[in-house]
Amino acid sequence: TGSSSSSSRTQTSTPEWLSQIQKDIPRTLHDVQSLESKDARESLLRILVCYYYRNPQAVGYCQGMNLVAAGLLSVMDEADAFWSLVCVIESRIGYYTKSMAGLLVDQCVL
């Protein structure tokens, strides 16, 4: 029993943001042939995780980023898709934030 208690202390749970990304990837543009492969899904995971680490406080990961990243990944390589995602998210201040304040304001205006 000593080994089981030491192994439970070393186990860490998956952070909520990573768990959400892992849930979203299989349901992201599943009908796009270029994104059906395991390699494409792993690229999408890397893009989203890298963006989380780029901007964990203001944005992190929020709903909808997977669709934007997948669309970009379907037409460009992983590095270009990542930097394009950065441009899209960081040029739309308030859309891709935890509160989504910019998006909510635009919805009220429209």
Image: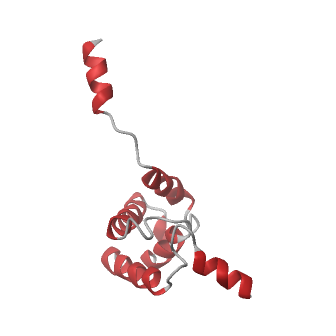
- In the picture, measured across the screen, residue 45 lies left or right of residue 1, that is right
On the question of residue 75 being in view, the answer is no
Front one among 65 and 35: 65
Q: In which quadrant of the rendered image does the N terminus lie? A: top left
Front one among 93 and 70: 93
Q: Quadrant of residue 105?
A: bottom right
Front one among 71 and 7: 7
Front one among 24 and 55: 55
How many numbered discs, if any?
0
| Residue 59 pos. (x, y %) | 45, 69
Residue at 39% in and 79% down: 86
- In the picture, measured across the screen, residue 9 lies left or right of residue 88, that is left
Residue at 38% in and 78% down: 81
- In the picture, measured across the screen, residue 88 lies left or right of residue 83, that is right
| Residue 27 pos. (x, y %) | 57, 59
**9 shown above or below 26:** above
| Residue 82 pos. (x, y %) | 36, 76
Q: In which quadrant of the rendered image does the C terminus lie? A: bottom right
On the question of residue 52 being in view, the answer is yes
The colouring scheme, among rainbow, by chain, secondary structure or one colour, is secondary structure
Q: Residue furthest top?
A: 1
Q: Quadrant of residue 47?
A: bottom left
| Residue 70 pos. (x, y %) | 48, 72
